[in-house]
């Protein structure tokens, strides 16, 4: 039986032994190196089928080894997988930029490691003898998994390493016998190929059959039917995108997690359209990149019938941005209110956003009507989780969503820092401040000389679009002389006798200012 030859470079002997034991069942012969220089020497002398590289190694780190291998024409085509304890997005991006097929983080899962190695070897460097083209094969019997998890045998026409590009349709030859039709039951949608069951391609060869000549093609021809399937915990979406881009596939990638579904279309390896629940285009891709559990199926794509919103960013830009967002999500989630509490913003704000903002922002704010928790808002938002949380954080900062540390008794409702001149006095004459943090119940004025707690203050300011100034008495309820504190030195003043008509005007202006802020945030994201 043919065996793959795999070079594993790691400075930890126990890790080397574990990886060797994991890969020997493929079957594979494992070569071992304990530093970067030894790995480079073995790669050049032994020419392995695959190299697994740790990053932090003595003499020469894994990134340095990869750079040297890619510069040498003799080793540049050997596929690489980084296996490292460094799990930050910048490390993963650097590894992929150096030409690695995948980047796995320690501690390793043995099944995941075997599946990824088998998949990469099966498409990149099959052991000799080479595979006979699929057009010359008779239907084979390949193990698949029933939904129950039991292994059964069903006839299929796709090779086990079916992520390889499909051959272009052959021109009809007058003297060639007609090929028997593929049985309709050959591949059932609920019986996908299981990548974990596949061995080296050499065990699946067949006697060659004379095939009609094929016309050369610059792009891989679209295929039909099921090509491959697997689990996202063993082959995550980042790796699938890299693989399909490298092979320039035209296909549709179907993903499922519980009751959730998603689809990404690839044409020539580039992502062209995507959809996931209410999300379309790039938002769908970013959301699907957060999935760490679930299943995937790769099917042929009829380009004119692809679905989902358009995607214009290149694959690598999507991956870099998606991984950056993934890193920030835990911190954003921690800053938001209790996920089991309903989320609500004032009706005036929802109406203002619907008037001023783009449809997606309006759809998000419409969800904040007090009937949905954070998790429900995230599930129904038209944005990915990161974008949704950023917008919710903005609303939290304006107190359109009450902060969890503020008790209901002292909540002031939405407040916004406005470039709104405000006059205030204890005794005449009025003093002036160029801006204030305004709410419908009070105002925070930045000043190095705040009044004492409990003092009453006369306030006067003119809102945008209003000719008559608002005049109201207030009382100092908070003060700080520390300029390093949030908001700086200043005093919080609660309105005492604000007219209802003036309160409505303030609330309307605040809602419009918040809606404008959301729109500008969305515009900045679109430009970036």
Image (tube, grey):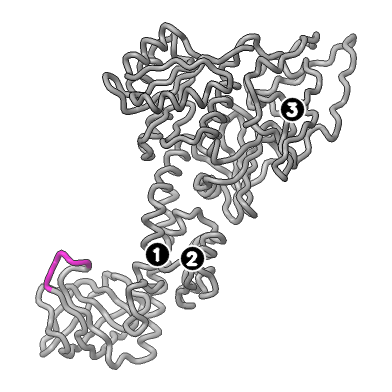
Mark 2 surroundings: few (<14), some (14-19) or many (≥20) residues within 10 A: many
Q: Are marks 3 and 2 in contact (CB under 8 Å)?
A: no
Judge whether residue 302 can be spotted in this image: no
Q: Secondary structure at mark 1?
A: loop
Label 1, on which residue?
336
Label of residue 142 in the image: 3
Measure the alpha-carbon separation of dots 3 and 2: 45 Å
Mark earlier in primary sequence (1, 2): 1
> Residue 242, percent across and down?
52, 31
Quadrant in the picture for the N terminus: top right
Q: Is residue 34 left or right of residue 225?
A: left
Label 2, on which residue?
374
Q: Secondary structure at mark 3?
A: strand
> Residue 79, percent across and down?
49, 20
Task: Indicate whether residue 435 is drawn in magenta.
Answer: no
Q: Is residue 303 left or right of residue 410?
A: right
Q: Residue at x 60, y 40 (%)?
A: 231
């Amino acid at each position: 039986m043919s065996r793959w030859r795999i070079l594993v470079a790691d400075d930890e002997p126990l890790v080397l032994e574990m990886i060797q034991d994991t890969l020997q069942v493929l079957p594979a012969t494992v070569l071992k190196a304990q530093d970067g220089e030894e790995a480079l020497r073995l790669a050049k002398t032994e020419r392995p089928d695959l190299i697994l590289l740790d990053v932090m190694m003595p003499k020469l780190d894994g990134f340095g080894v990869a750079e040297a291998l890619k510069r040498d024409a003799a080793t540049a085509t050997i596929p690489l997988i980084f296996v490292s304890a460094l799990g930050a997005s910048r490390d993963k991006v650097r590894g992929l930029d150096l030409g690695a097929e995948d980047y796995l983080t320690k501690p390793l899962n043995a099944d995941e490691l075997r599946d990824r190695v088998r998949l990469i070897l099966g498409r990149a460097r099959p052991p000799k003898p080479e595979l006979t083209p699929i057009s010359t094969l008779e239907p084979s019997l390949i193990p698949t998994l029933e939904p129950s998890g039991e292994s059964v045998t069903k006839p299929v026409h796709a090779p086990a390493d079916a992520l390889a590009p499909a051959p272009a349709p052959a021109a009809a030859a007058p003297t060639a016998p007609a090929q028997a039709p593929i049985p309709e039951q050959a591949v059932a949608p609920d019986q996908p190929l299981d990548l974990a069951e596949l061995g080296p391609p050499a065990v699946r060869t067949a006697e060659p059959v004379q095939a009609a000549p094929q016309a050369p093609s610059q792009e891989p021809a679209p295929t039909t039917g099921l090509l491959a399937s697997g689990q996202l915990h063993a082959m995550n979406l980042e790796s699938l995108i890299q693989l399909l881009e490298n092979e320039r596939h035209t296909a549709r990638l179907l993903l499922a997690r519980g009751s959730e579904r998603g689809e990404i279309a690839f044409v020539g390896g580039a992502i062209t359209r995507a959809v996931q629940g209410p999300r379309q285009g790039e938002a769908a891709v970013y959301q699907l990149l957060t999935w760490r559990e679930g299943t995937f199926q790769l099917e042929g794509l009829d380009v004119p019938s692809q679905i989902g919103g358009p995607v214009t960013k290149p694959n690598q830009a999507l991956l870099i941005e998606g991984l950056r967002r993934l890193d920030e999500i835990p911190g954003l989630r921690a800053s938001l209110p209790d996920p089991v509490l309903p989320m609500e913003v004032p009706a005036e704000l929802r109406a203002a956003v619907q008037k001023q903002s783009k449809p997606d922002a309006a759809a998000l704010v419409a969800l904040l009507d007090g009937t949905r928790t954070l998790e429900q808002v995230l599930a129904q938002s038209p944005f990915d989780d990161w974008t949704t949380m950023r917008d919710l954080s903005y609303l939290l900062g304006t107190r359109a969503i009450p902060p969890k540390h503020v008790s209901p008794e002292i909540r002031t409702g939405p407040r916004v820092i406005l470039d709104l001149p405000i006059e205030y006095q204890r005794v005449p004459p009025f003093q002036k401040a160029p801006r204030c943090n305004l709410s419908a119940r009070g105002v925070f004025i930045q000043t190095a000389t705040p009044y004492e707690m409990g003092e009453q203050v006369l306030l006067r300011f003119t809102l945008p679009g209003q000719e008559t100034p608002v005049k109201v008495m207030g009382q100092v309820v908070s003060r700080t002389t520390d300029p390093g504190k949030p908001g700086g030195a200043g005093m919080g003043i609660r309105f005492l006798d604000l007219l209802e008509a003036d309160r409505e005007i303030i609330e309307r202006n605040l809602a419009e200012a918040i809606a404008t802020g959301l729109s500008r945030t969305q515009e900045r994201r679109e430009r970036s």
